[in-house]
C-alpha cells in the first residue's frame, strides 16, 4: 500500500514538473488572463523575424504575430514576455507550459505535430532550405559541394534535410552541428565550414549581419518545403482556436482591404457582410472562441493586416527586401488563404 502511495505521489510530482506554469488541465486562455501577460517563445535573434532593436524592444514578423494574439486576448499588444529559445528548446518549452505559444521559425512536420505534445496553428510563412557560401569559393550550385563541410543547427529540419540532400545527390558532406543558429553562423563566418544551411529567408536575414554581406552568395537550389507556423500545447483546443483564428484574421484583413489605418472606418461604413462580421459590426464571432466582438479590431489596430506586417519587416523598403513569392495572397497567385470567419 505504501509503495503504491509513493508511486502515485511520484507520478503527481512528475506531472506538476512537466506543466510548471499552468497545471496539466488548466486552460491557457484563463492562465494568460490571470497573469495578465502572454509568454511567447521566439528565435534568439534573426533580423526580420525577431530581434531586439536599439532600445531592447523585440521587433519582427514573428513578434508582430505574437502581439496580435496579445491584442486579441489581453487588449494590449505590449503585454508579452518574450523568451528566446534555441531550436532544440522550442518543442519542450511549449509542451511543458514554459511558454503559452511559440512564434518563431518552426517547420510544421508530422512527428512534431503527432508525437511531441504540440499543435501547429496556421502557416504564416512558406519557406524552403538553401545554402550560403563565400563567393570566393566560386561554387554556383549546391550540387557541387561534394566534400564540403556544412554548418547547421541541431534539432532542426535543416539537419535532416541536409542528410537527405547529400544522399539523394551522391554527395559526401560533413555536417558541423551547433546548438544555436548564431553559433553555426559564426562558425561559417570564421571559416570552420564551407557552407551554411538553413531556411532561405533566414540566410538572407543572417547574411546582413556578416561583416561583408556581398562576399556571400545564396545558391539557387531550394531543397525542402518549410511551412512555418506558431506552436501551442497539444490538447487545449480553445487556445489553439484563438491563435489560429487571430492569424487567419490577419490574412483575411489583407484580402478585404482592412488596414491599421482604416479599420475603424471600415467597421463603421463597410457594407460588406464579411467585413461587418470580422469587425463585430454584425454577429459575435469572438464568442465562438472565448473573446469579445472587437477582437479583430484590436488585432488590426495593433499590428495591421498580414501584408502590412510582411512589408514592415521584409518589404522593398527594408534592408532584407525578401519578395513575397508564395506568401502572396491566393488571389495574387500565392498560398496565403484565409478561412471564412463566420
Image (tube, rainbow, N blue to C red):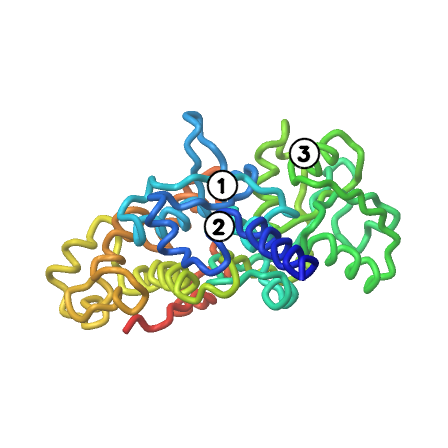
Return the residue at label 1. Answer: 50
Name, please, the residue furthest toward the left.
Answer: 269
Q: In the visual, does 38 lie left or right of 321?
A: left
Residue 171 % position (x, y):
86, 56
Q: Residue at 15% across / 69% down in the picture? A: 282
Q: Which one is earlier in the sequence, the residue at label 2 or at label 3?
A: 2
Q: Residue at x 66, y 47 (%)?
A: 88
Q: Which mark is residue 103?
A: 2
Judged left or right of residue 71, residue 44 is right
Left or right: 271, with 45 as reference point: left
Residue at which label 3 appears: 215
The local crowd at label 3, few if under 14, some if 14 to 19, many if 20 or more residues have their Cα within 10 Å, is few
Instruction: Tell us which disc is closer to us: 2 or 3.
Output: 2
In this rendering, is residue 180 above or below 126? above
Image position of 332 with respect to 84: above or below: below
Query: Residue sitting at 41 percent across and 25 percent down?
Result: 55
Amino acid at each position: 500500500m505504501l509503495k503504491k502511495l509513493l508511486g502515485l505521489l511520484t507520478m503527481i510530482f512528475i506531472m506538476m514538473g512537466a506543466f510548471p506554469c499552468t497545471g496539466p488541465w488548466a486552460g491557457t486562455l484563463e492562465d494568460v488572463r490571470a497573469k495578465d501577460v502572454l509568454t511567447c517563445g521566439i528565435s534568439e535573434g534573426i533580423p526580420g523575424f525577431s530581434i531586439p532593436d536599439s532600445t531592447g524592444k523585440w521587433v519582427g514578423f514573428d513578434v508582430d504575430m505574437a502581439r496580435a494574439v496579445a491584442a486579441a486576448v489581453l487588449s494590449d499588444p505590449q503585454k508579452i514576455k518574450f523568451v528566446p529559445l534555441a531550436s532544440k528548446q522550442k518543442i519542450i518549452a511549449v509542451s511543458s507550459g514554459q511558454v503559452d505559444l511559440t512564434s518563431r521559425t518552426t517547420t510544421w512536420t508530422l512527428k512534431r505535430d503527432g508525437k511531441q505534445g504540440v499543435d501547429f496553428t496556421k502557416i504564416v510563412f512558406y519557406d524552403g532550405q538553401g545554402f550560403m557560401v563565400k563567393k570566393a569559393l566560386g561554387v554556383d550550385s549546391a550540387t557541387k559541394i561534394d566534400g564540403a563541410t556544412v554548418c547547421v543547427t541541431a534539432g532542426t529540419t535543416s539537419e535532416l534535410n541536409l542528410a537527405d540532400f547529400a544522399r539523394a545527390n551522391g554527395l559526401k558532406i560533413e555536417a558541423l552541428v551547433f546548438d544555436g543558429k548564431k553559433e553555426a553562423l559564426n562558425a561559417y563566418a570564421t571559416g570552420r565550414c564551407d557552407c551554411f544551411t538553413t531556411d532561405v529567408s533566414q540566410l538572407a536575414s543572417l547574411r546582413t549581419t556578416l561583416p561583408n554581406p556581398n562576399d556571400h552568395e545564396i545558391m539557387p537550389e531550394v531543397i525542402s518545403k518549410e511551412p512555418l507556423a506558431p506552436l501551442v500545447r497539444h490538447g487545449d483546443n480553445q487556445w489553439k482556436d484563438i491563435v489560429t483564428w487571430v492569424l487567419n484574421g490577419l490574412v483575411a484583413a489583407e484580402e478585404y482591404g482592412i488596414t491599421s489605418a482604416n479599420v475603424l472606418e471600415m467597421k463603421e461604413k463597410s457594407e460588406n457582410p464579411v467585413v461587418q462580421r470580422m469587425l463585430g459590426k454584425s454577429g459575435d464571432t469572438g464568442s465562438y472562441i472565448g473573446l469579445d466582438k472587437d477582437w479583430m479590431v484590436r488585432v488590426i489596430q495593433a499590428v495591421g493586416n498580414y501584408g502590412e506586417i510582411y512589408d514592415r519587416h521584409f518589404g522593398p523598403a527594408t534592408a532584407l527586401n525578401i519578395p513575397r513569392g508564395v506568401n502572396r495572397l491566393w488571389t495574387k497567385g500565392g498560398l496565403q488563404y484565409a478561412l471564412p470567419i463566420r
